[in-house]
Amino acid sequence: MSFRQHSIFAALVAGAVWVGSGTAIAQQSAQQACAGDIAKFCGGVAQGEGRIAGCLRSHAKELSPACQRGMAQATTLMKEVVQACEDDLHRYCAGAAPGTAKECLRTNFRSLSMHCKRELFEAKKGM
């Protein structure tokens, strides 16, 4: 993964996968799998800006097998989305605030490339 892809991936993961009440691509499955771990290890951590994900990563060796699988699945799906949507993210979301890539893609969905739309659909279906 290039530095550019890694930066986009980090922004999407921080802003989409673990954040509170949105409908992010991998959020629901990962949150369900990690609900007990989030309560146990990250109960006092405020949601947003990837803080829950950071907390979970800091307890990676202590997480339940279900949470580890949920996080791995979410990471895999997000990598695939980043690769498919990299050009669209740069075209439409380059100036977006950190943690808002999900909303930016949603706002610009009609303009996204077919490849990006297809990968977003497949990722959502996979969850």
Image: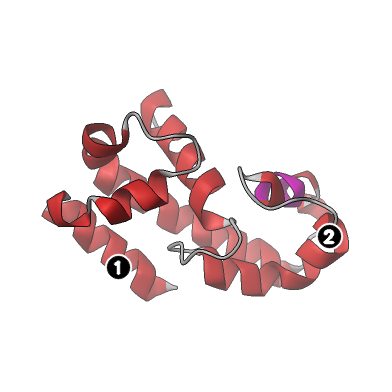
Depth check: 70 or 14 in front?
14
**Which residues, given as a range, are shown in magenta?**
53-57
- Across and down, in percent, residue 41 comes to 85, 57
Q: Residue at x 24, y 38 (%)?
A: 92
Q: Amino acid at mark 1?
A: Glu
Q: Amino acid at mark 2?
A: Gly
- Across and down, in percent, residue 32 comes to 64, 74
Quarter of the image for the C terminus: give it.
bottom left
Vertical order, 41 against 6 (above or below) = below
Q: Which residue is mark 2?
A: 43
In the rendered structure, does residue 68 fall within the stretch colored magenta? Answer: no
Q: Which residue is mark 1?
A: 122
Quarter of the image for the N terminus: give it.
top left
- Across and down, in percent, residue 10 comes to 51, 38
- Relative placement, left or right, of 114 versus 105 is left
The colour mode here is secondary structure
Give the image quarter of residue 64.
Answer: bottom right
Question: Which SS class for mark 1?
Answer: helix
- In front: label 1 or label 2: 2
Vertical order, 33 against 97 (above or below) = below
